Image (cartoon, rainbow, N blue to C red):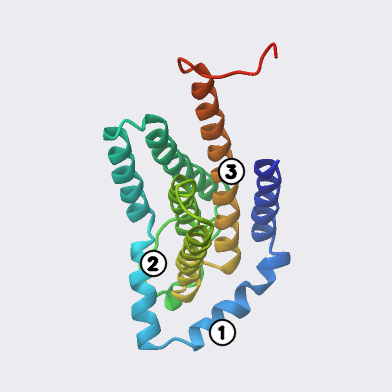
């Protein structure tokens, strides 16, 4: 149900950004406001965050994590992380080509960007890759650690997305759509991963079942 709701919300977010309604009405005011509020310190921090949260950096994080999990004989977890990242990359690239939305004007950009604007690849891959790491770390953590983990993940994903607007390479609605697309894809991947783990657990030798009781 979560995956379905997020999927429909993502479609609504993409439609709103593409047609210029709803959140997209904030695009121009936010871009102008953030451009006028730039400082050297904020810009330096934004550039660091946007590079650390780039699609390439997130792919490296996912691949390194996947290799470590595979070597630790956690094959399903490895496939989950790498598969989620790969699917996210394919999803946002396909949507960019399909929607073909122009980026903000070049004279306001502080970093290089060449592909189409909608949705933000940084926002999409950040929420997917960081989300998979949170899901894997979740069971072994006590409630307080889980809250901190979730807060740190949300702060990082939010920062990565918002730097794209601050640096002038994305509209706000691009970033919002990227978060929604990434969240929907993450929910689908978590559902598939959970189903597979439950299936393999039931099929394991000595598994206890309530059938016939």
For mark 2, does the 10 Å Cα neighbourhood hold few (<14), some (14 to 19), or many (20 or more) residues? many
State how far apart marks 1 and 3 are (Cα).
34 Å
Pick the front one: 207 or 46:
207
Q: Position of residue 171 (x, y in %)?
A: 55, 68
Q: Disc 3 marks which residue?
A: 187
Q: Helix or strand or loop: what does disc 1 sit on?
A: helix
Q: Position of residue 202 (x, y in %)?
A: 54, 20
Q: Position of residue 179 (x, y in %)?
A: 56, 57
Question: At 42% across and 74% down in the image, what residue appears?
Answer: 109
- Between discs 2 and 1, the one toward the N terminus: 1
Q: Disc 1 marks which residue?
A: 33
For mark 1, does the 10 Å Cα neighbourhood hold few (<14), some (14 to 19), or many (20 or more) residues? few
Q: In the image, is residue 210 above or below residue 98? A: above
For mark 3, does the 10 Å Cα neighbourhood hold few (<14), some (14 to 19), or many (20 or more) residues? many
Question: At 37% across and 59% down in the image, what residue appears?
Answer: 54
State how far apart marks 3 and 2 are (Cα).
24 Å
Instruction: Residue 12: give its label.
Output: none
- Between discs 1 and 3, the one toward the N terminus: 1
Left or right of residue 19, residue 87 in this image: left
Pick the front one: 163 or 115:
163
């Amino acid at each position: 149900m979560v995956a379905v709701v997020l999927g429909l919300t993502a479609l609504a977010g993409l439609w709103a950004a593409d047609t210029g309604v709803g959140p997209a009405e904030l695009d121009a005011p936010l871009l102008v406001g953030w451009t006028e509020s730039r400082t050297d310190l904020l810009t330096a921090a934004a550039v660091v965050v946007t590079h650390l949260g780039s699609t390439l950096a997130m792919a490296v994080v996912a691949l390194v994590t996947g290799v470590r999990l595979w070597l630790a004989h956690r094959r399903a977890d490895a496939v989950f992380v790498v598969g989620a990242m790969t699917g996210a990359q394919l999803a946002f690239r396909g949507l960019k080509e399909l929607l073909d939305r122009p980026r903000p004007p070049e004279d306001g950009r502080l970093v290089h960007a060449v592909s189409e604007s909608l949705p933000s690849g940084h926002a999409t891959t950040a929420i997917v890759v960081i989300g998979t790491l949170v899901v894997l770390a979740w069971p072994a953590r006590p409630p307080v650690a889980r809250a901190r983990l979730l807060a740190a993940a949300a702060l990082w994903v939010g920062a990565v997305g918002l730097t794209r607007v601050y640096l002038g390479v994305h509209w706000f609605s691009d970033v919002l759509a990227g978060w929604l697309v990434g969240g929907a894809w993450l929910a689908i991947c978590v559902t598939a991963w959970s189903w597979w783990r439950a299936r393999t657990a039931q099929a394991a030798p000595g598994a206890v079942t309530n059938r016939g009781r």
